[in-house]
Image: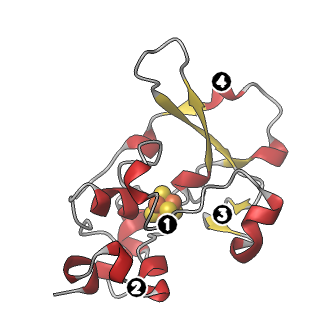
Amino acid sequence: MPFWQRKSFAQMTHAEWESLCDGCGKCCLHKLIDSDDEDDTVHYTDVSCVLLKTDTARCSNYAERTQFVPDCVVITPQNVYELDFMPTSCAYRRLAEGRGLPSWHPLRNDGSRNAMIAAGMSAAGRVQNENEVHEDLELRIVTWPLRDRN
Ligand code: SF4
Protein backbone atom coordinates (compact mmCIF):
# COMPACT_ATOMS: atom_id res chain seq x y z
CA MET A 1 0.00 0.00 0.00
CA PRO A 2 1.32 3.52 -0.73
CA PHE A 3 2.33 5.63 2.25
CA TRP A 4 -0.73 7.91 2.08
CA GLN A 5 -2.96 4.88 2.58
CA ARG A 6 -1.00 3.14 5.28
CA LYS A 7 0.29 6.06 7.38
CA SER A 8 -1.52 8.69 9.40
CA PHE A 9 -0.54 12.31 8.76
CA ALA A 10 1.50 12.29 11.95
CA GLN A 11 3.43 9.19 10.85
CA MET A 12 4.53 10.65 7.50
CA THR A 13 8.04 11.93 6.95
CA HIS A 14 8.45 15.58 6.03
CA ALA A 15 9.19 14.59 2.41
CA GLU A 16 6.08 12.41 2.24
CA TRP A 17 3.95 15.17 3.72
CA GLU A 18 5.26 17.72 1.23
CA SER A 19 4.79 15.32 -1.69
CA LEU A 20 1.04 15.19 -0.97
CA CYS A 21 0.74 18.68 -2.45
CA ASP A 22 -0.26 18.31 -6.10
CA GLY A 23 1.07 21.78 -6.95
CA CYS A 24 -2.26 23.01 -8.31
CA GLY A 25 -1.72 26.50 -6.88
CA LYS A 26 -5.44 26.95 -6.22
CA CYS A 27 -4.88 27.61 -2.53
CA CYS A 28 -2.73 30.60 -3.55
CA LEU A 29 -5.71 32.43 -5.04
CA HIS A 30 -7.40 35.25 -3.19
CA LYS A 31 -10.70 34.22 -1.66
CA LEU A 32 -13.68 36.21 -0.50
CA ILE A 33 -16.05 35.16 2.24
CA ASP A 34 -19.67 36.20 1.84
CA SER A 35 -20.51 37.80 5.19
CA ASP A 36 -24.21 38.03 4.25
CA ASP A 37 -24.31 34.27 3.88
CA GLU A 38 -24.80 32.38 7.14
CA ASP A 39 -22.75 29.48 5.70
CA ASP A 40 -19.77 31.83 5.17
CA THR A 41 -19.48 30.67 1.56
CA VAL A 42 -15.93 30.94 0.20
CA HIS A 43 -15.63 32.45 -3.28
CA TYR A 44 -12.43 31.95 -5.22
CA THR A 45 -10.98 34.58 -7.54
CA ASP A 46 -8.51 34.24 -10.40
CA VAL A 47 -6.14 36.64 -8.70
CA SER A 48 -3.12 35.05 -7.07
CA CYS A 49 -0.82 35.75 -4.20
CA VAL A 50 2.11 38.00 -5.09
CA LEU A 51 4.53 35.07 -4.79
CA LEU A 52 2.75 32.75 -7.22
CA LYS A 53 4.38 32.24 -10.61
CA THR A 54 1.23 32.30 -12.70
CA ASP A 55 2.68 30.38 -15.67
CA THR A 56 3.57 27.34 -13.55
CA ALA A 57 1.36 27.81 -10.45
CA ARG A 58 4.39 27.33 -8.22
CA CYS A 59 5.43 29.55 -5.32
CA SER A 60 8.46 31.68 -6.19
CA ASN A 61 9.79 31.52 -2.63
CA TYR A 62 8.20 28.51 -0.94
CA ALA A 63 10.84 28.18 1.81
CA GLU A 64 10.46 31.78 2.99
CA ARG A 65 6.87 32.44 1.95
CA THR A 66 5.56 33.30 5.40
CA GLN A 67 8.17 36.03 5.80
CA PHE A 68 6.83 37.79 2.72
CA VAL A 69 3.17 36.78 3.06
CA PRO A 70 2.45 36.51 6.80
CA ASP A 71 -1.12 35.29 6.27
CA CYS A 72 -0.04 32.35 4.07
CA VAL A 73 -1.58 29.30 5.72
CA VAL A 74 1.01 26.61 6.42
CA ILE A 75 -0.79 23.26 6.38
CA THR A 76 0.26 20.94 9.16
CA PRO A 77 -0.89 17.57 10.54
CA GLN A 78 -2.51 19.62 13.32
CA ASN A 79 -4.61 22.03 11.23
CA VAL A 80 -5.28 19.70 8.28
CA TYR A 81 -8.77 18.86 9.55
CA GLU A 82 -9.81 22.53 9.43
CA LEU A 83 -9.27 23.24 5.74
CA ASP A 84 -12.82 23.97 4.63
CA PHE A 85 -11.57 27.10 2.82
CA MET A 86 -9.25 25.01 0.65
CA PRO A 87 -10.37 23.67 -2.74
CA THR A 88 -12.13 20.32 -2.49
CA SER A 89 -9.49 18.89 -4.83
CA CYS A 90 -6.67 19.69 -2.38
CA ALA A 91 -4.87 16.48 -1.50
CA TYR A 92 -4.62 17.42 2.18
CA ARG A 93 -8.33 18.14 2.37
CA ARG A 94 -9.20 15.01 0.42
CA LEU A 95 -7.18 12.77 2.70
CA ALA A 96 -8.45 14.50 5.84
CA GLU A 97 -12.00 13.85 4.63
CA GLY A 98 -11.19 10.20 3.84
CA ARG A 99 -11.60 10.66 0.06
CA GLY A 100 -8.15 9.40 -0.98
CA LEU A 101 -5.98 10.77 -3.78
CA PRO A 102 -7.55 11.16 -7.23
CA SER A 103 -6.31 9.33 -10.33
CA TRP A 104 -4.73 12.53 -11.70
CA HIS A 105 -2.58 13.21 -8.60
CA PRO A 106 1.20 13.31 -9.34
CA LEU A 107 1.85 10.60 -6.72
CA ARG A 108 -0.34 8.26 -8.82
CA ASN A 109 1.37 9.34 -12.05
CA ASP A 110 5.08 8.78 -11.37
CA GLY A 111 5.46 12.37 -10.16
CA SER A 112 4.16 13.88 -13.39
CA ARG A 113 1.81 16.87 -13.20
CA ASN A 114 0.50 16.29 -16.73
CA ALA A 115 -2.60 14.36 -15.67
CA MET A 116 -3.40 17.00 -13.06
CA ILE A 117 -3.14 19.76 -15.69
CA ALA A 118 -5.17 17.71 -18.20
CA ALA A 119 -7.88 17.22 -15.56
CA GLY A 120 -8.21 21.02 -15.31
CA MET A 121 -6.97 21.15 -11.73
CA SER A 122 -4.03 23.54 -12.14
CA ALA A 123 -4.15 27.31 -11.82
CA ALA A 124 -1.20 27.58 -14.22
CA GLY A 125 -1.88 30.00 -17.04
CA ARG A 126 -5.39 30.81 -15.78
CA VAL A 127 -4.77 33.46 -13.18
CA GLN A 128 -3.23 36.91 -12.78
CA ASN A 129 -0.78 37.96 -10.11
CA GLU A 130 -2.18 40.46 -7.59
CA ASN A 131 0.60 42.85 -8.64
CA GLU A 132 -1.05 43.20 -12.03
CA VAL A 133 -4.66 43.53 -10.89
CA HIS A 134 -6.17 46.90 -10.08
CA GLU A 135 -9.87 46.09 -10.06
CA ASP A 136 -12.17 45.02 -7.27
CA LEU A 137 -11.68 41.35 -6.34
CA GLU A 138 -15.46 40.86 -6.43
CA LEU A 139 -15.21 41.28 -10.20
CA ARG A 140 -12.74 38.41 -10.36
CA ILE A 141 -14.79 35.64 -8.75
CA VAL A 142 -14.50 32.31 -10.61
CA THR A 143 -15.91 28.85 -9.96
CA TRP A 144 -13.40 26.56 -11.68
CA PRO A 145 -11.09 26.29 -8.61
CA LEU A 146 -13.96 24.58 -6.76
CA ARG A 147 -14.23 21.71 -9.23
CA ASP A 148 -12.87 18.30 -8.33
CA ARG A 149 -12.52 15.04 -10.20
CA ASN A 150 -11.60 11.56 -9.17
S1 SF4 B 1 -4.61 23.38 -2.93
FE1 SF4 B 1 -3.61 21.76 -1.74
S2 SF4 B 1 -2.74 20.41 -3.29
FE2 SF4 B 1 -3.17 22.35 -4.36
S3 SF4 B 1 -1.27 23.57 -4.18
FE3 SF4 B 1 -2.55 24.09 -2.41
S4 SF4 B 1 -1.84 22.72 -0.76
FE4 SF4 B 1 -1.12 21.86 -2.70
Spatial CA distance of label 4 from label 1 is: 32 Å
Disc number lying in front (4 or 3): 4
> Do labels 2 and 4 touch, CB within 8 Å?
no
What residue did someone put label 4 on? 139
Residue at 49% of width from left, 66% of height from top? 76
Give the crowd class for mark 4: few <14, some 14-19, many >=20 residues within 10 Å.
few
Which quadrant would residue 31 be assigned to in this image?
Answer: top right
Question: What amino acid is at disc 3?
Answer: Asp
Q: Which of the numbered marks, if any, corresponds to residue 111?
A: 2
110 relative to 76, above or below: below
What residue did someone put label 1 on? 76
Residue 147 point in image, percent of width and height: 35, 44
Spatial CA distance of label 4 from label 3 is: 22 Å
Q: Earlier in the sequence, mark 4 or mark 3?
A: 3
Give the crowd class for mark 3: few <14, some 14-19, many >=20 residues within 10 Å.
few
Question: What amino acid is at disc 2?
Answer: Gly
